[in-house]
Image (tube, rainbow, N blue to C red):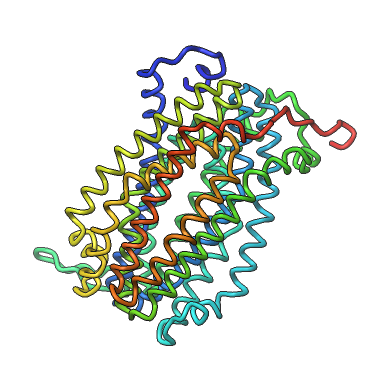
Amino acid sequence: MSIKLIQEGAPLSFARRLRLTAGLSWPAMMAQLSSILMQYIDAAMVGRLGAGDSAAVGLVSTTLWLFWGTCSAATVGFSVQVAHRVGAADYVSARAILRQGLVCSLIFGVIMGIAGIAISSSLPGWLGGDAGISDKASLYFFVFVAALPLLTLNYLGCGVLRACGNMKVPGGLNVLMCVLDVIFNFFLIFPPREVHLPGMEITLPGAGMGVLGAALGTVAAEVATACLVLWYLLRREKGMAIWGARSEDMPERRGKRAFMPVWSVLRNAAKVSSPMMIEHMVICGAQIMVTVIVAPLGMMAIAANAFAVTAESLCYMPGYGIGDAATTLTGQCYGAGRRDLARKFANLTVCLGMAVMSMMGLILYIFADEVMRLMSPVDAIVSLGAASLRIEAWAEPMFAASIVAYGAMVGVGDTIVPALMNFGSIWLVRLPLAALLAPSMGLQGVWLAMCLELTFRGLIFLMRLLRGSWLRKGLHTAPVPMPDESGV
């Protein structure tokens, strides 16, 4: 419904815009929350293995986010172009962009996977990890990066579905991934064990693989979900399916040349994705530096920091869900030539994101101890993590402003300036403050620096959003030329 209203130039009242925003945001928020729930489950299960295993996972977690986020950013340039062509009701070009995105994303995922495997054995030492946890940390990292080719295609598939306005399928499949993760981890992490029930005893099977089991279980769930996402997109999604029953009426030719990259598409993809990839690398590099700052504080601080980062995601992942909706709405409006409507949707989604994340921050502040205890039974870890979370809760409203405003700007293809804003904020504000405060305040000093930086970042994103310059920095998209018949 939202696509037709935007494509047809129909007037949209505030109430209708709010309904469209809520309709797209809710499934996206559920998808993000299910993803976070999966991280909670992983953290809770690994936390039961002890502080050493928790520290092994926490040591490499920021580097994993570097690889995941870089692969995800590489696919955004294609999904943004799909959103523009869908907004213009040009599904032939949208499908052409999808085909090229599949090829390029697969190649990029293979390259990143090989790079990750190459550094996996040396990474824990580079990060200053203790020798007692290095082997487990290295193995955990290796399993995840080996699956990057398929995971990159999953990022592309979910992004294209969202660009078409389909939030329900990615959301539902993310919930399924969470369920599969629980099942796989339950049997792979722990050894066989006895469960005592009234009048009977049950022996539960288990592989007893510990940290390796946690990695294998999560990757297995992600791979299964990726296969389902790609199947639905390529065979079932209306207007985008390139194989199967829904592809029968496509006017374009279908053959090997249909998957060959077109320069105009690659140029636009690079314009959107390259700043995002560089930004993500730089930001994750800063997060790795935070890990290096935290490492001298001891194993308990490393584990508490990792668990607190996972716990805080309960607050900001709804913001990322609303940011996904903002990307879809502004992208379709921009592709349809309705820039005033794109601005209205951007303002509305930012306000909604700030409201939701403020509420989540309040909940996290009140229940910080209980949330940390879900992930670790170690009192020192719980105490350190809860204190950090209560500091961070104050930054959630402005963090929401930066997340959702960034999503709106990405929707029109404006990524260079937002990337520079994120880069400057984290490297010029967070890292110097963290290095300054950590020696005297410990882990709480690191999180105070994070709180101040996120507040600053939100302010500068709000200023740019309200000025409207981002609408003049978008992509100039056009129909994609088809391969000639002689090459098909």
Residue 134 spot, x, y in % from top left: 46, 82
Q: Residue at x 55, y 33 (%)?
A: 469
Q: Is residue 205 visible?
A: no
Q: Quadrant of residue 359?
A: top left
Q: Residue furthest left?
A: 198
Q: Quadrant of residue 199?
A: bottom left
Residue 359, placed above or below residue 56: above
Quarter of the view holding residue 16 = top left
54 on left or right of 146: left
How many numbered marks have been drawn onto this rendered protein structure?
Answer: 0
Query: In the image, what residue occupies the spot 44% across and 78% down?
Result: 136
Measured as percent of width and height from the top left, residue 254 is found at 76, 34
Judge from the rendering whether residue 307 lies leftward or rightward of residue 119; answer left or right.
left
Outermost residue to the right: 486
For the C terminus, the image quarter is top right
Residue 84 visible (yes or no): yes
Q: Could you tell me which residue is drawn at 47 percent across and 22 percent down?
A: 2
Q: Position of residue 407 (x, y in %)?
A: 49, 40
**Pick the front one: 165 or 401:** 401
Towards the viewer: 66 or 484? 66
329 relative to 273 in the view: left or right: left
